[in-house]
Amino acid sequence: MELDMKYFEEMEAKIPKGKVRTRFAPSPTGYMHVGNLRTALYTWLIARNAGGTFILRIEDTDQGRLVEGATDVIYRTMAQCGLTHDEGPDVGGPVAPYIQSQRRDTYGKYAELLISKGGAYRCFCGKDETEPADPKEIQKHVCDCPKLTDAEIAEKIASGASYVIRQKIPQKGTTTFHDASFGDITVENSELDDQILLKSDGLPTYNFANVIDDHLMGITHVVRGSEYLSSAPKYNLLYESFGWDVPTYIHCSPVMRDAQHKMSKRHGDPSYEDLMNEGYLTEAVLNYVALLGWSPKGALAEREFFTLSELAEAFDIAGISKSPAVFDIAKLRWMNSEYMKKLPPEVFFEKAEPILREAIPNPAINLKTVAALVQSRCEILTDLPGRVDFLAKLPDYDVALYVHKKSKTTLENSLAALEACVPVLENLTDWTNESLYAALTELAAKLEVKNSIVLWPLRVAVSGKESTPGGATDLCALLGKEESLRRIADGIARLKAAQ
């Protein structure tokens, strides 16, 4: 087959050069799990740190695994996270198209070029069309197809015989590649398989399309999971066969659920969308994910909190660890709570209002006041209903809550305190937190007891909970006079029944 070398020269001439170019190249096969998000974040940070170009490429050559709507999830997640791409299917660029299924003819031409350079061959065996599910798995293919003469190949093609194109791996010697995290790795060529590059339907396999696209798009740094370390020697041999420069490899160790298990949707581990639905903040998730396998150096070594722009300034490939990172949901909750506290009150209320409105349908209760009380005590937004549900309805509670060691309250003095509160509150005309607090601390002084002897029983009576956002007078002010007195009467009845 005669090759049009002008085509390849024109393709080479299009390749942008002179600065860092990275790509996030997801397959639209489902949700954006935490490992995907970390890869997207690291590739974006490398480009932004170097003043380079960040590319979004959709790798959809495995048509059997495509999930409807998954591409929309990718776009939406990237936009929500602020990981803006400079080139991609939706914004175009100098090396379009950026969707692999739209580049089909390109792969066929480069497969033919590779055959002409001795790096690949046509295989007519009709075996092993599928790639291993596990990229670390080696399935050695042995056949006589590499020995076929040009005449024999032409005869088979003329007869309509189906074939794939396989990479021709040297049988002897070694291949060495360098990874930014793992250093130099050398493998025996005899351990490598003649992998399929182009399937019989003309579509490329992941391993081939990946290399072709990375070269033609001028990618300088390739970030991917460490499970692809075993494929890297074959990538190197492809680059060498074509006579192309090899990009900088950065293989990241997996994100683990625990010391033994990788994160998996099948085991209920959360995706980015799951975390959003559970009430986490994007800024907190990105900050936490950045530190899953990377740590800042120098003066920033002990720092934990970074904005996205601060991460871009601080990010250094040398900080990426070889060790697996364990996804600690408790640590993420803590970090998220710190981000919650720092939100401007109006921003927090905007996020919390829909949840609060559903949890507290009573229009008489001021939700802005509720939001102000819960903001500093909120780890994730979905915690809110459980923190404020008592404002909608007094829960059934155990009178044992009235006994509080630190406040020095008992069932007896709690009953006495509540009974003493009733006339004071009934006569109070200014029903505000300040007036309530002044009246009740004055009552405590009259009774010659500590403030807590009055305020703890009152808080239990109006909330039915051990822990609440805000103290007794905050809650009374929210509930209003009538409802507060009704709940206090209920508390008195419960305490009398328990005596």
Image (tube, rainbow, N blue to C red):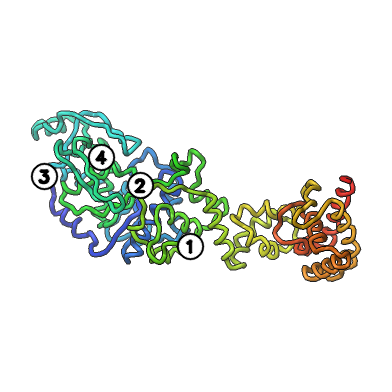
Residue 111 locus on image (x, y percent): 19, 43
Q: What element carries label 4?
A: loop
Can residue 167 be seen here? The reply is yes
Which residue is located at x 29 percent, y 53 percent? 180
Residue 81 locus on image (x, y percent): 46, 58
Task: Determine contact: label 2, label 1, CB under 8 Å.
Answer: no
Residue 205 locus on image (x, y percent): 28, 41
Say few, some or many: other residues with alpha carbon within 10 Å of mark 2 (under 14 / 14 to 19 / 20 or more): some
**In this rendering, is residue 151 above or below 294?**
above
Mark 3, residue position: 2
Q: What element carries label 2?
A: strand
Front in this rendered view, residue 390 or 127: 390
Disc marking residue 305: 1
Q: Which of marks 3 and 4 is nearer the N terminus?
A: 3
- Spatial separation of the CA atoms under disc 1 and disc 3: 58 Å
Q: Earlier in the sequence, mark 4 or mark 1?
A: 4
- Spatial separation of the CA atoms under disc 4 and disc 1: 48 Å
Say few, some or many: other residues with alpha carbon within 10 Å of mark 3 (under 14 / 14 to 19 / 20 or more): few
Front in this rendered view, residue 336 or 112: 336
Which residue is located at x 34 percent, y 41 percent? 62
Q: Quadrant of residue 474?
A: bottom right
Q: Earlier in the sequence, mark 2 or mark 4?
A: 4
- Spatial separation of the CA atoms under disc 3 and disc 2: 38 Å
Front in this rendered view, residue 8 or 187: 187
Mark 4, residue position: 202
Q: Looking at numbered disc 3 in the image, what kind of residue is underneath it?
A: Glu
